[in-house]
Image: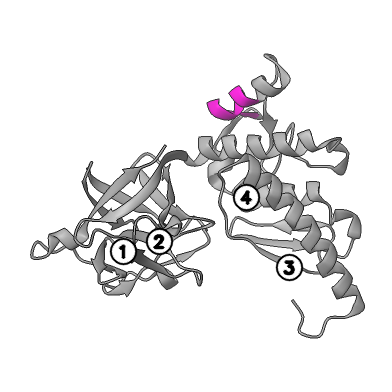
Amino acid sequence: MSSNPTEDERDAYIRITMTMRSAIYFYNKYTNLSKFINVYYSPGVPTAEASSNGDLRFGKDRSYMFVGTAMHEMAHTMGMGTTSEYRAMFRDGVFQGQKAQALLREIDGPNAVLKGDSQHFWPYGLNYSSEVKSAQDLINHARIVEAMYQDIFKEAFYKQGRVKSASSGKCMGITSSNTLELMDCTNEATLVKIFSMGDNPVTYRIQLGTRVVDIPNESTAAGIKASTYGFNGGAHQKYVFEGSGNSILLRNYKSGHYLQAVGNDIIQNPLSSYNRNSFTWQIIEEK
């Protein structure tokens, strides 16, 4: 955002903010998808565009500052039409994912088929503003994108609850300043949602509110304090769960280090048999 915006920029910022708030509302209300997105006003962009790295740009044409366009572009940030994984899921123009096809049949009837090309899918891809005839079209879009994401990236909701340190008896939580720290497990800020991803190996993201457990700067060094950040799909935000029940280890998929409870901090370090208890965690599930 410009520090000294022109009249054109001020008008665009207002329109884009309102549009994105509406788009985020539908995705947040009807899906469990999570993505850190940077939104820009770029007058040189003819319409609107987005990439899987989370960048989303609106051009000068106000007709594209519209909730349907915003949701279409948000789908691009989540890999729809922007990743090789997406393209690999199509055969002869038909999407091969079972979850998304089943959901579309549930919405449109037994003969409905989800189709697409290297960049777009239909129906409910919101490729044109004319596709949005009611709020239900926006809801259906969000639900289809989530199902496609699950098919493509093998993602599914795993558990909701708390992640408790065996050594301190405290739970991972997020502070008002988005810091990750250990705190009393009765604190509402310790409630997490855990999602599984992939299948070889299965990894997990640990989500607190709209943010996930993250290793700053994607560091692979030992001694780095874990924090929180918006999910961007990076390996540094994914964990392999080793063990089960009341005794699991959380291995960062990128660094290979394990999360260790050190005071109220959570640090990534090589696993040590000397103080193994500080590396041990329990997932307390809540229905």
Q: Tag 4: residue type?
A: Thr
Would you identify the image quadrant in which residue 26 lies? top right
Q: How many marks?
A: 4
Q: Which mark is residue 128?
A: none
Q: Report whether 244 appears left or right of 73.
A: left
Query: CB of mark 4 within 8 Å of CB of mark 1?
Result: no
Q: Which residue is mark 4?
A: 82
Residue 192 x/y as whole percent: 43, 51
Q: Which residue is mark 3?
A: 40
Q: Which mark is residue 173?
A: 2
- State the CA–CA distance, disc 4 to disc 1: 26 Å
Would you identify the image quadrant in which residue 135 lies? top right
Q: Secondary structure at mark 1?
A: loop
Which circle's residue, 2 or 4, is located before the other in the chain? 4
- State the CA–CA distance, disc 3 to disc 4: 18 Å
Front-lying residue, 8 or 80: 8
- State the CA–CA distance, disc 2 to disc 3: 31 Å
Q: Which mark is residue 255?
A: 1
- Residue range highlighted in magenta: 94-103
Q: Is residue 54 visible?
A: yes
Residue occupying image coordinates x 76% and y 84% = 3
Q: Tag 3: residue type?
A: Tyr
Q: Is residue 201 visible?
A: no
- Depth check, mark 2 against mark 4: the one in front is 2
- State the CA–CA distance, disc 2 to disc 4: 33 Å
